[in-house]
Each structure stands twice: as structure tokens, then as C-alpha cells.
Image (cartoon, grey):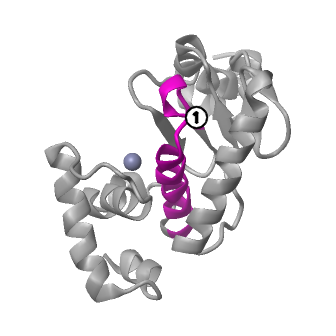
Amino acid sequence: MPKKIITLLLLLAPVAAFALYKPVRVLAPELFGDVHCIDDQICIEEPSRLDEARALCDASLHFVADTVRPFQQPPRVIFCSSKDCQNAFGFDKAAATTVGRSGIVVAPRGWKPHYLRHEMIHHRQAEELGILAAFTKPEWLVEGMAYALSDDARATLADRWEEARQRFLKWYEVVGRDRLWSAATAL
Ligand SMILES: [Zn+2]
């Protein structure tokens, strides 16, 4: 293959990654979604709802930092008000989704404190356990922790998540708050 073409392909590779793997788009939200990035913390589709988004974010950041220790770098949160916006980042059904340490996308139905807290716990997991933790660590730890420590008010969840929450709580009772991350790392 001629050198020029190889160079061109290499140059295009990041663009292809952005185009093909939509979740990567959280790295440059304004390029791919109809959102405005206000600062390092918030991108929003409907700027008239900024106060609401800011209040949700601040309260959740404090809650999660208190519960599972302070953030190394707080996540950037992309607040979508439409399905199109959510889809632009590659998400369909979830109320909110975390992409490693890169950011959180909140769907129209996800503007609720427990969803934000849940996703921010996933962000802390990525900080403490690595960005692949969601794939390499047991589901009862990853999801169980996010459901159990986000103060999710739902008394019972769908079976799969309820089992994860209960199993995590049993483990957490033994491990305790101070050893949360060291014990999780060892799993
Ligand atoms: Zn989750």
C-alpha cells in the first residue's frame, strides 16, 4: 500500500473511532451532539435547564464523595433532553450511562438524584479499579455497589440487580467502608 494512503488511514483512525464507537463521543460532546458545554462539569442540550442540572450534579458529587471517597477528577456530565441527543452518544434505553472516566450521559428520563449518584459511583470505580472494571470485576460488585451506595429508594429492583445489591451489602458489611477499594481491588 502506498505510504500516502497508510498515512491518511492513520490520520483518519481517530475520526473513525469517533464515528463508529459512539460512546467515545463523550470526549468531544459538542462535535457530535447538539449540546453546549458550559464548563468542565456540565454539557447540556437545553441551557434553560442549567440550574436544575447544576443542582443535581453538585448534590450527587457531594453525596458520592462522602460515601466512596473524593473524586480524583469529577466526571463531566452531559444532560440530554431528547432521545436524539441520547442516541448521538450511542445510548438507547438506559436512564444514564458512564463511559470509563470520560463522562456520564444522562437521558431525558435520567434527571433524578439516584441515577446521577449511581453513575458517579461507576465513575469512582473507574478511578479506583481501572476503566475496564465494568468488564473485569464481578457484576455483584460493580452494579451491586452502584445500587447499594447510591441510596436508591426503590425497595426492590429487578431480580438481577436486587441479587447484586444484596450480595454487595453482605460483602460490604464484612469489608467496611475503609477497606472498600482495597478489598474491591483484590477481588
Ligand atoms: Zn450501573
**Image location (x, y in percent) of residue 109:** 48, 27
What residue do we see at 27% from left, 87% from top?
A: 174
**Image location (x, y in percent) of residue 133:** 42, 59
What residue do we see at 65% from left, 31% from top?
A: 79
Q: Residue furthest top?
A: 84
Q: Is residue 107 above or below residue 151?
A: above
What residue do we see at 81% from left, 45% from top?
A: 40
**Image location (x, y in percent) of residue 122:** 48, 55
Work out which quarter of the rendered image holds the C terminus and state it: bottom left
Q: Is residue 127 above or below residue 21?
A: below
Residue 111, magenta (yes or no): yes
Left or right: 155 in relation to 51: left
**Magenta residues, start to end:** 105-128
SS at mark 1 in the image = strand
Left or right: 163 in relation to 44: left
The one nearer the camera, 176 or 20, is 176
Q: Residue furthest right?
A: 39
Is residue 8 in view from this perspective? Answer: no
Residue 74, magenta (yes or no): no
Work out which quarter of the rendered image holds the N terminus and state it: top right
The one nearer the camera, 144 or 30, is 144
Amino acid type at circle 1 is: Val
Mark 1, residue position: 105
**Image location (x, y in percent) of residue 27:** 70, 36
What residue do we see at 25% from left, 60% from top?
A: 165
Our reading of the magenta stretch's main secondary structure is helix
